[in-house]
Amino acid sequence: MNESEIIERAEALPDRFADRLPAQTLDSLRLMEAGGEYGELAIELAASLAARSVPVTPAERDELAALLAAMGMPADPIAQLNVQS
């Protein structure tokens, strides 16, 4: 995954999960996006989803894991996600 792909995928995350997260969390994620803080955005999103036990698909989990790995970010929250088939 190159830098352009990372940016494109990370920028899509807030909208993808908008219906599953509180407005305050979305606002924070969008601020991170606007500031180019894509690694922080991905890890904060994963941590927020895990903390709230928000259902995610296996594909969404894999996408978050791949983004975190591509950016060299810790993937600890991935194991705590509520993955639903």
Image (cartoon, grey):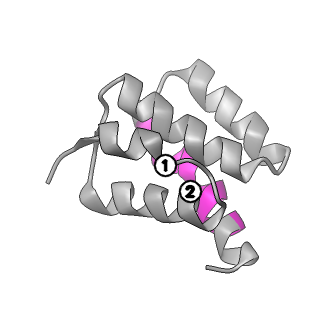
Prevalent SS, magenta region: helix
Residue pointed to by mark 2:
68
Residue type, label 1? Ala
Q: The residue tagged with tag 2: helix, strand or loop?
A: helix
Residue pointed to by mark 1:
75
Residue 61: x and y, percent?
36, 54
Judged from this view, the residue extending furthest toward the right is 35
Q: Between marks 2 and 1, how big is the CA–CA gap?
A: 6 Å
Residue 31: x and y, percent?
77, 35
Q: Is residue 18 visible in the rendered structure shown here? A: no
Badge 2 crowding class, 10 Å Cα cut-off, few under 14, some 14 to 19, many 20 or more, is: many
Magenta-drawn segment: 7-19
Image position of 1 (left or right of 62): right
The vertical placement of 27 against 70, above or below, is above
Residue 11 on the magenta segment: yes
Q: Is residue 30 visible in the rendered structure shown here? A: yes
Q: How many marks?
A: 2
The vertical placement of 58 against 45, above or below, is below
Quadrant of the image containing the C terminus: bottom left
The vertical placement of 26 against 56, above or below, is above
Residue at position x 69%, y 42% in the image: 40
Residue at position x 82%, y 51% in the image: 36
Residue type, label 2? Leu
